[in-house]
Image (cartoon, helix red, strand yellow):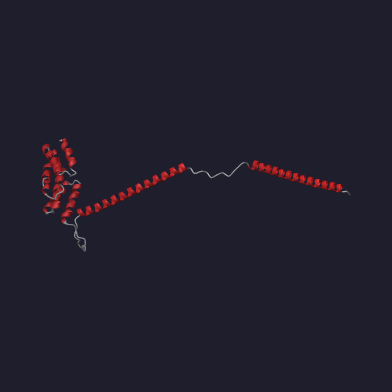
Amino acid sequence: MSLNVVLGKLSALKMLSIATMMFSSLWVGCESSEQATHQDSDEQALTSFVGDQRPESAPAIDTLRLAQLEAENGALRQKIGRLEQDNGMLSSRVADLESKIVSTTRAVEPARPATPAPSAPTPPPISSTGYEGATKAFGQKDYDSAIKMYDQLLGQGVSEDLADNCHYWIGESYYGKKNYKDAISHFEKVPGYKTSEKKADAYYMMGRCYEMMKDNAKAKAMYEKIVKDFPTSDKVKRAKQRWGQL
């Protein structure tokens, strides 16, 4: 075999090898392209099936509403603070008033010496019993019995703190009997007792008696005396009314 023939065969083999390599490269490229195409198709199919849904982000906080709630909370705290302060002030005032009441009561009520308890209850004094009976008779409009019992008390030398009352209620009893002259005679004795608490009442009843006797001048004088000399009496208002009607 000649050298040219051998060279020719070698060239043919070399060309065949090159062609084989080129064909393999083309096949691999086509396969990769086909795989990529299949992959894109799968992704598109998955997207069409599931939908273009992405995880939703967390809702944003409404900062304006949060600020409003904080402002309302602060306002409520301020109101609670004011209420607590007012409550404290009221409690303090109540405590002060209670303290004043206690101190006033102690000042008004004199201290009484402690006395041993009696071994057996003693009957009330005769004057006290008679005064209660006379008052009961007056309440029942039994004026004659009331006058008699009050007179007995005065005859027994009843204490001064009851004597002025006896004269006053005798006068009221005579007034109930429309015996205005005798009523005035007993009402006039009441202001003579320095410690009497019935003075303004006695002057008022004297004014009423003078009215009934048609002596308006003396009635006005009695009412005027009450207004001037006893301004804190509960009879002042009634005295002014009677005075204005005369």
**Please, which residue is most extreme toward the bottom here?**
119
At which x and y percent is residue 169?
15, 47
| Quadrant, the C terminus | top left
Nearest the eye: 206 or 56: 56
At which x and y percent is residue 24?
76, 46
**Please, which residue is most extreme toward the right here?**
1
Nearest the eye: 214 or 8: 8
Res 206 → quadrant:
top left
Number of marks: 0
Q: Residue at 23% of width from left, 54% of height from top?
A: 103
Q: Residue at 21% of width from left, 55% of height from top?
A: 106
Nearest the eye: 165 or 236: 236
At which x and y percent is residue 154?
12, 52
User: Is residue 148 shown to the viewer in this render?
Assistant: no
At which x and y percent is residue 79?
37, 46
Q: Residue at 44% of width from left, 43% of height from top?
A: 67
Answer with left or right where residue 13 lies relative to residue 180: right
Answer with left or right where residue 70 lies relative to residue 180: right
Answer with left or right where residue 70 lies relative to residue 147: right
Nearest the eye: 143 or 50: 50
User: Is residue 167 shown to the viewer in this render?
Assistant: yes
Answer with left or right where residue 177 lies relative to residue 74: left
